[in-house]
Amino acid sequence: MRRSILTAATAVTATLALAACSGGEEPAAEESAAPELEGSLTVWVDETRIDIFTELAEEYSAERGIDMEVVQKASGDIRQEFVQQVPTGKGPDIVVGAHDWTGEFVTNGVVQPIELGDKASGFSDVSLAAFTYDGAVYGVPYAVENIALVRNDDLVSDTPDTFDDLVAQNDDTGADYPVIIQQGDEGDAYHLYPLQTSFGAPVFEQNADGSYSPDLALGGDAGDAFADYLGKLGDEGVLDPAIDGEKAKQLFLDGKTPYMVTGPWYASEFTGAGMNISVLPVPSAGGEPAEPFVGVQGAFVSAKSENALVANDFVTNFLGSTDVQLRLAEAGGRAPASIEAAGQVDDAIMQQFSDAAGSAPMPSIPEMGSVWQFWGVTEVELIQGKAKDPAKAWNTMVGNIQDAIAG
Amino acid sequence: MTDVSLASPPRADGKRGSDSHARRTGPGWYVKIVLMAAVNALGLYGVWTAVVVGSWGVAVFLALAVAAADWVYFSRRMLPAKYLYPGLVLLLAFQLFVMLYTAYVAFTNYGDGHNSTKADAVAAISAQNERRVEGSETFPLTVVERDGELGFAILRDGEVAVGDATAPLAPASGSDDGTQVTGVDGWTTLEFAELISRSAEITELRVPFSDDPAAGGLRTQDGSLGFVAAPVLVYDAAADTFTNTNTGVTYTPNDHGSFVSADGDQLTPGWRVGVGLENFTAIFTEDRLAGPFLQVLVWTFVFAGLSVITTFALGLFLAMVFNDPRVKGRKIYRSLLILPYAFPAFLATLVWRGMLNEKFGWVNEVLLGGAQIPWLTDPWLAKVSVLAVNLWLGFPYMFLVTTGALQSLPGDVLESARVDGASRWRAIRSITLPLLMVSTAPLLISAFAFNFNNFALIYMLTGGGPHFEGAPVLVGHTDILISMVYSVAFDSGVKQYGLASAVSLLIFVIVGLISWLGFRRTRTLEEL
């Protein structure tokens, strides 16, 4: 009896298993037929751009006769997942993201250079410089964003040329805060960077093509002067680590300050709340032009793309076209990277932000990671007045960054 | 994670032994056959899929798991295994694999710059260093075909020129539209749709630009733009070296998975190799890490220890108070006390972070009437805040378990103590506490292990800050080991999975050791 049950059981499971196998053969058969289709492109985008890219992919697909698969990845994971998945062969053909991923992608060998040819001159210099690493371009830019001085026109209508005068202007205006620059417990070097560059202390030396060399430039006399200035602003209460992004936005919305240094991400909330705002370049504090970091969005082609030809066609010829750049600008609320498209933008605020962008892309070289680590927290120490000698604390930071870069 | 073996609790019907399920042909038997068939079908489907995608490890594991399942559930003998099997499989797949993989990574240099295999690294270095020849033109390019061989046609100085992999570009007769070649005699012009199916061939094709090999090769990336490119770094597979064609410098592979030149210049990317114990020794010997590491290690023990003691003390105190029948409305109080436990911990932590903000926080603003106490930014206060928030988060659990334990204490022992004239305090100290410890000590040990690795609390509340002023790594006064690993190995910009895995292993060993010692101690308690 028992044996027969066992046999019966084996027979049943075997049959079911075979059925399962035959069921499993279908996708397998499709896979083996894959070389004939071969026109399938996979694009990874994050949740903020999935809609527009799905739409664009459909158009491209209809135009070129290629299957497009747009995959949504969480914005917090997409970068790391790309670095991890490309070597396994499971990565996409194209990933859409920020230019400051370039260094990490190149040093991990997961992206390939893109030759733009004459099209290169159609993009703004800073947007191309952003995607340039070691002399080669690795991404096709489509949007540019940067912070600038946002003014509440209901409180003030003219803006001085220097940051000191801007702070002093509040003696007449009488708002709670002369200007808001968001910080937070761990600092926010990104929002302070325009002030820093106005002292002539950029993070790294910039090469002729706009990309960065790993030689630190934020030290020296210029850096010391900036450190002292931060201490002074902290002393006067102009800067405050307790004000983070959310609080900064609220204070500006509530009309507690005439100025806020921020980016286009909050601008729509301000106009949505019925405020009259203008966007201006940040006034200089140290005498030189105050240049914010410029962030550029664009598309990379995977080093292991099996459809590199189509992937390149998609990013250079399709995403690079004026019409598509304009639509991406409209969808994302950021100025287009294409010069021609930027000239056709019909949005005053976007235009003003774009005018305030300088020539300093956020560095994408891996050495930048070591800078971020120490930068913000040191600035917070300076603002809080914890460091008795600001210049000395600044130099300790420069030394630490140097050591961290050297490994 | 705990006690997976309990996934299928033994049935209480007592039908075991000779009357085993394996041989009974009741309705249960049919259910079992169907279930096992499904397991087999799923398993074999998994094996098949794994084989198709070439994941041999997964295929072997699944095949063994299915075979083992059949053996266990159709055999008459393996009764304990019938209960243990699902748990064991999950344990192997989700725990042991992860642990072994972590252990493996700990001995490699896996991380940014050493992300893949050597073959990938060689391919990436070659691709990144094939550059458009400086000052060269770009051309609208047409892909053409002759006898299955691909070629490129461009307009050079207004004349049609065509070439393929072996024949350099040479003038040919054909037609053009002024910018681009539209046809070459003897060649077929390929449409975009045809290009797609030969994508790889086209992107790999280099048509020599002239008879001089140094002039570089015409290539295309998108099938329409042609440019002349020449490699800056050339890989010699036989010698396993890269040579720079401009400077003549050669780069040879070293034992750390990188190509380096004689004067130490390193090419990126490198590849993943084993580095032995280097990740482990780095924690202790590297100056930048060793100093903060010891400070953090001490605080980790203090934090985990104090967290357990404070939560247990408060939980026990409240449990005793609300265990007293004289307290009115005990049920309401008890429900209220459990509230923090019902709150998602890291949401609560974020809320606390906001409430403890120096300037705008509710604690300073409302409770303390506008005082500006740096709860999270002063080294000592931050430590106190971390412990206090953890106390708020953790005491309901201790309250629950001690309430349960108190209620199960035998009343007669306490009563006889009272009869013997023991004071209340004496009875608590000599009877209640020891008896309580028997059932709660294992929970205290697991609470210690949990807090030892309480990453979410530290990361959400203080981010490890305030930062050690001027320290060479970004580690702070409230960082515990696991959050230090995170900031050193991930937040510093260059990801070091090898180092992170090594410290994780170290933490595993420490926690394992402490738990083992703790459980040994508990056993002596049980003998009381």
Image: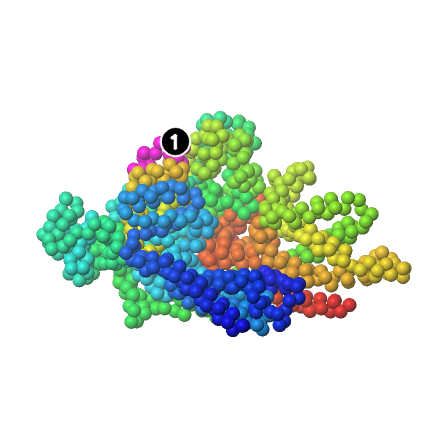
Residue A364 at x, y percent in the picture: 40, 51
Question: What span is colored magenta in the figure?
Answer: A335-353
Q: Position of residue A67 (x, y in %)?
A: 32, 49
Quarter of the image for residue B447 reads bottom right
Whether residue A137 can be seen here: no
Residue B244 visible somewhere in the drawing: yes
Q: Quadrant of the C terminus of chain B?
A: bottom right
Residue plotted at (71% across, 53% down): B400
Q: Residue at x 51, y 48 (%)?
A: A376
Which image quadrant is residue B5 in? bottom right
Left or right: B151, with A218 as reference point? left
Crowding at label 1, few (<14), some or many (≥20) Cα neighbours within 10 Å?
few
Instruction: Find out whether residue B213 is within the magenta segment.
Output: no
Residue under circle 1? A348
Question: Is residue A48 or residue A136 the one in the foreground?
Answer: A48
Q: Is residue B57 above or below residue A254?
A: below
- Asked which secondary structure carries label 1, the reply is helix
Number of marks present in the image shown: 1
Q: Residue at x 44, y 63 (%)?
A: A16
Residue A340: say if magenta: yes
Q: Nearer the viewer, residue A350 or A90?
A: A90
| Left or right of residue B527, residue B489 in this image | left
Residue B78 image-quadrant placement: bottom right
Pinpoint residue A58: horizontal percent, then vertical percent. Answer: 33, 43
Q: Amino acid at mark 1?
A: Ala
Chain for numbered disc 1: A
